[in-house]
Image: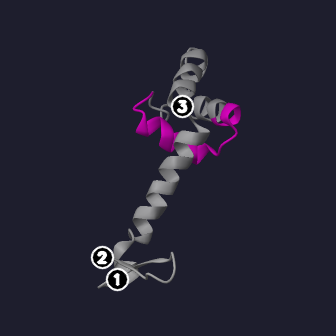
Amino acid sequence: MPVSNSSTSTLQLKIDRPLESLLPTYEQMEQEANQFAAELLMPEVIVRRLVEKYATDCRGDDLNWRLATEMLVSGTAMKRRLRELQLPQIDTVHT
């Protein structure tokens, strides 16, 4: 509940529990940060366009490498993003 001190313009809050209990867990913050980074570095629209562009010539790890190279991200990050967007199976072998 806000408590106002009439002699200053400072606003103080009374917190009945430790500040740490108000914050999300470390794991949740890490997951949210990873999601934000994936969406920032690999926007869905661009990833989908690149998949359309390269999927006819590349499959599996070749496609993953091509996309990761285009987006300047790691292969692991691209694999995760493709799975998240439910795009082509990248685990299939190029034939």
Which kind of residue does numbered mark 3 sit on? Answer: Gly
The location of residue 9, given as percent across then percent down, is: 51, 75
Label 2 neighbour load within 10 Å: few <14, some 14-19, many 20+: few
| Residue located at (56% from left, 48% from top) | 37
Residue 60, label in figure? 3
Task: Give the overall secondary structure of the magenta segment.
Answer: helix
Name the residue that disc number 1 marks. Answer: 14
Q: Nearer the viewer, residue 93 or 79?
A: 79
> Does label 3 or label 1 sit earlier along the sequence?
1
> Does label 3 or label 2 sit earlier along the sequence?
2
| Residue located at (58% from left, 41% from top) | 40
> Does label 1 or label 2 sit earlier along the sequence?
2
Residue 75, label in figure? none
Label 1 neighbour load within 10 Å: few <14, some 14-19, many 20+: few
User: Is label 3 in a helix, a strand or a loop?
Assistant: helix
Could you tell me how far apart the alpha carbons at marks 1 and 2 are, in whole angstroms? Answer: 6 Å
**Could one spot residue 95 in this view of the protein?**
no
- Taking 67 as reference, is 78 above or below it? below
- Taking 34 as reference, is 8 above or below it? below
Which kind of residue does numbered mark 2 sit on? Answer: Met
Q: Nearer the viewer, residue 52 or 62?
A: 52
Q: Nearer the viewer, residue 69 or 3?
A: 3
Residue 1, label in figure? 2
Colour setup of the view: one colour
Residue range in magenta is: 68-87
Tags 1 and 2 touching, CB below 8 Å: yes
User: Is label 1 in a helix, a strand or a loop?
Assistant: loop
